[in-house]
Image: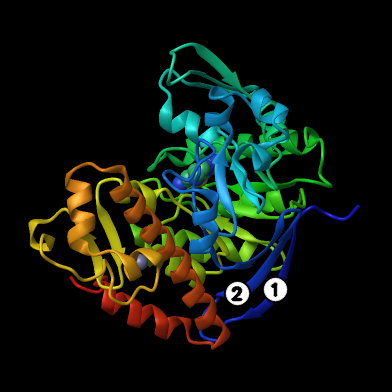
Amino acid sequence: MKPAVTYELIKTCKQSGARLGKVHTPHGTFETPIFMPVGTLATVKTMSPEELKELGAEIILSNTYHLWLRPGHDIVKEAGGLHKFMNWDRPILTDSGGFQVFSLSDLREIKEEGVHFRNHLSGEKLFLSPEGAMEIQNALGSDIMMAFDECPPYPAEYDYMKASVERTSRWAERCLKGHARPEDQALFGIVQGGEYEELRKQSARDLVSLDFPGYAVGGLSVGEPKDVMNRVLDFTTPHLPENKPRYLMGVGSPDSLIDGAIRGIDMFDCVLPTRIARNGTCMTSEGRLVVRNAKYARDFRPIDEKCDCHVCRTYSRAYIRHLVKANETFGFRLTSYHNLYFLVNLMKQVRQAIMEDRLLDFRNEFFEMYGFNKP
Ligand SMILES: Nc1cc(CSc2ncc[nH]2)c2nc(N)[nH]c(=O)c2c1
Ligand SMILES: [Zn+2]
């Protein structure tokens, strides 16, 4: 049977370990490396699907945990699935809920059968298992499902991490068994193991032996320093198959996207662009710009003079500052649109640099402009 999602390796950058690829899914094909906007509650906050397409979004993320609690995966299923429910006809990836349980809920108890926790909205006691996570993602109808994993806190003791990796591998096997429609949906395994090279290799070996159509590197962007993340990627990605997509979960800032691509990562997601937009912070080619700052009151230039997005071609810093200060929703729509475009466009430049075998040069130019090299 033809897998629902396949990866086409176009070329590898001669200057770095970066790859140019294409991921073919039932809802369309996207080029990699790619940034995926996050739409946790079946919306990329403040953006319409038409605007997402206009700014260049190809694939978006949503969340098993959140949609299970609200509105309920049964309602989404009745609507004909998440694509129909939210009017998004391009690829959708859903996270499995494990991470959200650990990050949102207190009173959680991890057992072999699954995780017991409290609903972070109502306080009621709930239970989520690998089988449950698969049932929910099956109902949502996402093109890419994530295995139910444990993302341990950073840092974590070696013994705890080893036991957790082994349980996550057993859970991954249970997810595969509970995979109802592999011809329509792809299930990606999630490599864990913290900062321990032996455990990362063990986790990768366990999951590669189960032959998933794609692999995520989990357990990062959980508070570790960036050099730790880069070191973990250096000794993890080589153990993942070259002919499958690699997804670094929860990442991230512009520098992390570039450094991840250099280390062979193909897919990224992060709530950062829309989250900082909602407090009036914008990503620009010369670093972050906090538009509510008084110095922009009479600044009639665009957010980013090097950006060609609709917002930067149409509105001024003064106008957006005014809206943000007045807490006008339109102001946050403008900052969100620009920030999403910034990251989607950054990955377009990364793909171009890989095509021209000059991604390390691009990294140095971008870091200099953005101010990442400043001590
Ligand atoms: N940093 C980080 C972020 C996420 C959420 S990714 C996401 N879900 C929805 C939006 N974005 C993770 N998810 C899982 N399942 N496992 C992880 O280890 C992990 C690590
Ligand atoms: Zn812009």
- Measuring from the top left, give residue 194's x and y in whole percent: 47, 47
Q: Helix, strand or loop at disc 1?
A: strand
Residue 375 visible (yes or no): yes
- Image position of 181 (left or right of 282): right
Residue 199 visible (yes or no): no
For the residues marked 1 and 2, what is the alpha-carbon distance in whole angstroms?
7 Å
**Residue at image point 53% right, 47% down:** 193
For this rendering, which residue is in front, 286 or 104?
Answer: 286
Residue 83's disc is none
Whether pointer 1 and pointer 2 mark residues with C-beta atoms closer than 8 Å, the reply is yes
Q: Is the C-beta of the residue carrying label 1 under 8 Å from the nearest atom of ligand 1?
A: no
Instruction: State the residue position of label 2.
Output: 19
**Amino acid type, label 1:** Leu
Q: Residue furthest right?
A: 1
Instruction: State the residue position of label 1.
Output: 9
**Residue at image point 49% right, 73% down:** 262
Location of residue 25 with respect to 98 vertically, above or below = below
